[in-house]
Amino acid sequence: MKNKNLISINDYSKEEMLRVLDLAEEFEKNPTQAILNGKVIATLFFEPSTRTRLSFESAVNRLGGKIIGFSDSSSSSATKGESLKDTIKTVSNYSDLIVMRHPIEGSARYASEVATVPVINAGDGANQHPTQTLLDLYSIRKTQDTLDNLNLFIVGDLKYGRTVHSLLMAMALFNATYYFISPKELSIPQEYKMFLDHLGLKYYEHTDFKDIISEADIMYVTRVQKERFSDPIEYEKTKNAYVLRNRMLQNTKSNLKILHPLPRVNEINTDVDDNAKAYYFTQALNGVYTRQAIISLILGLKN
Ligand code: CP
């Protein structure tokens, strides 16, 4: 995995994903180690972020590395018209690894083609968010003791949610059964259904989860992605499609965990937060250990 870009979750084999999870377990036990001494990591965020950027930066700081970059592209020379290519070539000269979030699908792949250091995709438009998926896998394995043969409910914006697209692909390696729950306007795109059809995996599409929630092992709730809508009226129609409330969890499996990549808006009521089945804040914490694992593998500091 040394020097390998991480742009799509498909860039990693099943064995590589499991290696990340095993190493993340080691970092969870011992998160402060000075293995990144002398290394500089660039975080280039052309879109807003709380968890992804700060957990990457926390991961680097706890490993003794240094961070450069920007959290708001308006403070970069992109506002003067500098191309992404020129920005990436320049930052390659200043750093050992680039972590980039960008609103355009395919931008991370393009960046990896012009960079002279490895690139990690921290989210490219509605396309992929592979490090989120690795922390999601870590969270699923930790709470279920397995990744295999689970009933995976994915709720909300399945059209624009990049975390959904990456997770769906990764869980295909573990024989998941998928329950896609969304308004019709935000249903899972055809290409992902074709991907699952090709693999012979089972999936079901629903517009509500109330009658089927008792089947779920993992309920992965997502926000409606306001920033991806070209028509604000369409966003208004779908923004409150689902609100998970504590009382809805009464007749659910004892192993059920509620995951959410966050940020949430209204889709999980705060009365769920104290339920032992709510796992989304610990899931975000797992992002630190998982990203420590990814960085140290790409930089060849662990193998
Ligand atoms: N899950 C996630 O990508 O969160 P941020 O947008 O806060 O980084």
Image (spheres, rainbow, N blue to C red):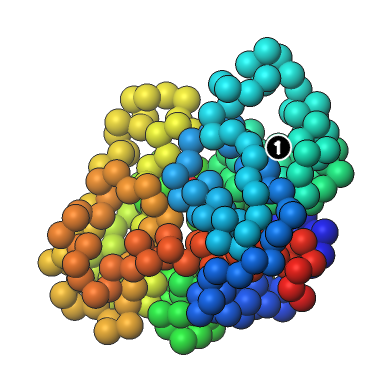
Residue farthest toward the left in the current orientation of the protein = 247
Mark 1 neighbour class, 10 Å CA radius: few under 14, some 14 to 19, many 20 or more: many
Quadrant in which residue 227 is drawn: top left
Residue 157 in sight from this viewpoint: yes
Of residues 172 and 190, which is closer to you in this image?
172
Residue farthest toward the bottom in the current orientation of the protein = 145
Q: Is residue 71 left or right of residue 207?
A: right
Q: Is residue 231 left or right of residue 212?
A: right
Residue at 42 percent of width and 24 percent of height: 231
What is the total number of numbered labels drawn onto the structure image? 1
Residue 166 in sight from this viewpoint: no
- The yes-or-no answer for disc 1 within 8 Å of ligand 1 is no
Residue at 58 percent of width and 22 percent of height: 75
Q: Is residue 269 left or right of residue 8?
A: left
In the displayed structure, 75 sits above or below 5; it is above
The residue tagged with tag 1: helix, strand or loop?
A: helix
Residue at 47 percent of width and 67 percent of height: 286
Of residues 38 and 140, which is closer to you in this image?
38
Residue at 49 percent of width and 49 percent of height: 54
Of residues 179 and 85, which is closer to you in this image?
85
Quadrant in which residue 271 is drawn: bottom left
Give the quarter of the figure containing the C terminus.
bottom right
Residue 83 x, y percent position in the rendering: 76, 22
Residue 163 x, y percent position in the rendering: 52, 54
Amino acid type indicated by mark 1: Ser
In the displayed structure, 84 sits above or below 199; it is above
Residue 175 x, y percent position in the rendering: 57, 79
Q: Which residue is mark 1?
A: 107
